[in-house]
Amino acid sequence: MIGSPVIWIIIPFMAAGLLLFVNNERIVKISAIFLVLCLSLAAGFFKQDFSITVAGLGIKITPSLHILGRELTLEQSAQPLILLIYSSLLLWFIYLGMFKIPDRTIPIILLITTTLIAAISVKPFLYAALLIEIALLISVPLLYQPESKDHISLLRFITFQTLAMPFILFSGWLLTGGSPAGSAQSSLPVQAASFLGLGFVFLLAVFPFNTWIPMLAEKVAPYASAFTLFIFSTISLIFGLYFFDNYPWIRESSQLPGIIRVVGMITIVSSGLLVAVQTNLKRNIAHAILMETGFSLLAISFLKTGGLVIFFVLLIQRTITIPFWSAAISTLTQNNPDSNYSSAAGLGKRQPLAGMLLILCHFSIAEVPLLAGFASHQSIWQLLGQTSLPLAVWYGIALIGYLIGGLRSFNVLFISGQADTLPPAFPWYQRLLVSMGLLTLLILGIFQQMTGQLALILIKMFKHLG
Amino acid sequence: MNIFAELANWFFLLLAISAGAGMILIKDLKWNLVAFAVQYLGVFYFIQLDWPIRLALIKLLGGLTSGLILYLSSRSVVANPKGDLAWPQGIFFRLLGLGLITMMATALTPQLLNWLGLSHYFGVWVGIFLMGLGLFQVGITSHPLRVIISILIILAGFEIIYAFVETSILVSLMLVTINLGLAFVGGYLLSPANIGSQ
């Protein structure tokens, strides 16, 4: 019998460990792409609890793997999420394969991803906080830029994410039967919710604990910051949903949705207004990821009225938009690493495809029609309008700020600066990747039901929410 | 509680305060690491009040190994880095901070004892003190070594309190792994390429 975590966690983890020792970057890239492709196909086609016979040897795939008295469980219903994660990783690796990146980048990204998948599959799930911390430590070499003398953003990233761990561990103890003898049973939920809330405030980098995110995005290579921010925020949100799924008192609470809604709105408004005054291309993607976290929190606050489907639609769109946005920035800045507006003026004229992809990714999150993010963000706004008019107004203000930021980026890339008479010849495969990104955003915008159908499959991974 | 246990509790509490004061007031990174190691003796003592001594020893060894890793990494770094602009004129601010943390620990300990249903006053006091100390230190420094030490102190304080409520060996081993990982991260960030900024 083989536990499914062996296929999607142990094997890629060990493969990543082996690839760390391979010096030939071409072999590393090809091997990683092939491995992730196989894992994606396996997640799409393998059925669990079935037996196959290979050369006289019977193999049965089961959902669980027992390690040191604990369990890693990836049930059949979770396989669509695994498919999404590994498909996204395939896209990241194809994108990274087209640029010059430091050695060991791809194995480190694979190690981070497998550790975080282990975090959402471990039982009891309080161990997830420890595994997320381990993934954080693994990500440090990816984010460390020797040429930059300033590592304050990296240190803050380590500090804030580490501060989340004690709170989540305490809440985990309270939730899994830790029953303090001296304290009243009626105050247990309040204590557990307080610790949990504080833990997720740090983990999701909710305002005002999010100052490090734009700093990190500015100082670090676009692929490193975009991938790290994307994967950590996504896994943290899914981890948070497990608490809703497993504890009825959290799910049925009347106050919690309101609190989450306000927290989400604060994150969206602060990021949206800051984008309007940004002067750096890389910081915009950081604020976009923060806004997406805020949107996801809003979706979670509407779990009883279809918010879970919207959450997964946002997740799918984010999975596609962020790598392409990062690829666009990498393409634009590969000859000119300074991404400040003063240095980036006119870059879009020299590389129009990449510039347009960046703008479309930005506008996709700004709820511009016919782009990937329109329907999901519109749905959230509608639900917000039905619940609270002031919050809906603030949502609109945040979107206006975000849109202004996008228009300023457009101005910098396409209107300001001097155009060269001939565009530089950047490789055909980069042009192909960027073109694919443009098409994908438009196709997903026109055929919104595609992401909706996939979201309806993804929600089944939760027993009580789905 | 017998008189020896009471005296031991007071001794390690005062040791924690002294080591904390040393960490905040002494600028030299090497002496900071010595103070960190001394603090871990206190962590070990309070953990072993509830845990088997061999498990508490794992925590002690993990903490001391972390300190050793940071010490070996810091040998290539200047002893008195310029990263903290408030030194030395901030000494009164730091003493004030230490006093406030001490008061905070004294005020919060009964509440936390009640919340968590514990009875180890001194252990919880030292845990809150260390967490407050680490938070204070991480808020006023940008030097990688000091930030990592501060995070390790926060985790040390948390581990004392957590040891009173959770006895899982796997969790404690994973926490020790994380401590060692943080120490390695600190060493990684203190690479020769970064020496110029210190």
Image (cartoon, rainbow, N blue to C red):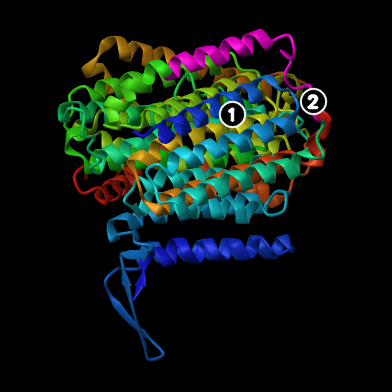
At horizontal 77% and vertical 41% (from top left) the residue drawn is B191
Mark 1 crowdedness (10 Å alpha carbons): few <14, some 14-19, many ≥20: many
B97 part of magenta stretch: yes
Q: Which residue carries the number 2 mark? A: B80
- The magenta-colored residue range is B79-105
Looking at the rendered structure, the kind of residue marked 1 is Arg
Question: Which quadrant of the rendered structure holds the C terminus of chain A?
Answer: top left
In the picture provided, is A10 more to the left or to the right than A196?
right
Looking at the rendered structure, the kind of residue marked 2 is Asn
At horizontal 37% and vertical 36% (from top left) the residue drawn is A168
Instruction: In the rendered view, tell whether residue A162 sits above or below residue A432.
Output: above
In the picture provided, is A41 more to the left or to the right than A63?
right
Chain letter of the residue beneath label 1 in the structure image: A
Q: Is residue A427 visible?
A: yes
Q: Which of the two discs, 1 and 2, sits closer to the camera?
A: 2
Mark 2 crowdedness (10 Å alpha carbons): few <14, some 14-19, many ≥20: some
Residue A378 drawn at (x, y percent)? 33, 26
| Depth order, front residue of B54/A15 | B54
Q: Residue furthest bottom?
A: A56
